[in-house]
Amino acid sequence: MKIPEGFRLDLARRVQSELARKVVESPLGEVDVVAGVDVAYAGDIAYSAAVAYSLKRGRVVGSACSINKVVFPYIPTLLSFRELMPMVRALRRLSTQFDVVMIDGQGVAHPFRLGIAAHLGVVLGVSSIGVAKSKLYGEVVGNKLVDPRGGVIGAVVKCKKQLYVSVGNRISLDEAVALVKSLCTNSTMPLPILLAHNKANEVKAKRGMSATFDKWGEADCSA
DNA sequence: GCGACAG
DNA sequence: ATCTTGTCGC
Ligand SMILES: [Mg+2]
């Protein structure tokens, strides 16, 4: 996958900077349903899945998926241009409502303060948390991620392995960290993301490389 | 120019 | 992320 012709990095940065101003970092309050989203790939096809997990009921209460054409390569700091649409489409197919969504990637711990979790949160107007397996930006100071330009932009959380947690949108860092810790599993990622990760791979395995895409590059995941 | 570099 | 089988350990 090559960078689309006409792509302007300066415009992309402008969009990121503008949307970053819309990020809200404040307490969310009580949380019941936590959604998780992730994407798997096979060639230039992206298989995304969203899973909703209820903390009160202690079980999965919903799930959905979407199949999309990949339209952008993986480039650090520009992950949204590759995975955001597949994630949004999987989430919109979730009939279940959720209080917050955990995403495999950075929240505001991004050079332009708009990692994919923050981007999705602002675009959909929902609460979101960024949970990454490795660091993209920031300096680790104790168990915090600090922006060289000033301010705390995330936290280092120890589940099975080290995780970098950052606010996506409409939640506090403390709440985000507490939520991730409460959902840590025997695997690297917290339960909602792990379930979404597995479902995305199941969809890829079951569907293989066959799909009919509409003019927006999406194919049926249910049929 | 060099080092860093989510998935 | 993906490419890839068996093998070691609980
Ligand atoms: Mg992922």
Image: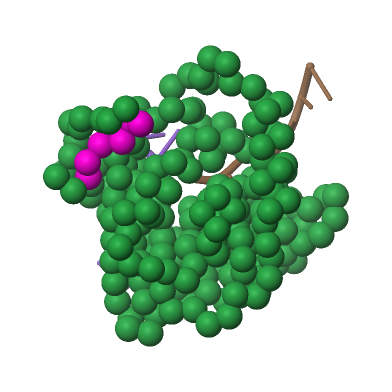
Chain colours: A green, B brown, C purple
- Rendered location of residue A78, percent (x, y): 59, 35
- Rendered location of residue A29, percent (x, y): 58, 80
A206 or A83: nearer the eye? A83
- Rendered location of residue A3, percent (x, y): 52, 20
Number of numbered labels in the structure image: 0
Q: Quadrant of residue A196?
A: bottom left
Up the image or down, A13 lies above or below A128; here it is above
Query: Would residue A208 appear left or right of A126 to someone viewing this image?
Result: left
Quarter holding the N terminus of chain A is top left
Up the image or down, A14 lies above or below A170; here it is above
Q: Is residue A22 magenta?
A: no
Q: Is residue A185 visible?
A: no
A122 or A206: nearer the eye? A122
Magenta-colored segment: predominant secondary structure: loop
Q: Which residue is pictured at 40% across the width and 51% down the height?
A: A38
Q: Which residue is pictured at 47% across the width and 63% down the height?
A: A101
Query: Would residue A24 appear left or right of A56 to someone viewing this image?
Result: right
Q: Which residue is pictured at 26% across the width and 30% down the height?
A: A213
Q: Residue furthest right?
A: A149
Quarter holding the C terminus of chain A is top left
Query: Would residue A25 appear left or right of A210 to someone viewing this image?
Result: right
Q: Which residues are magenta?
A: A216-221
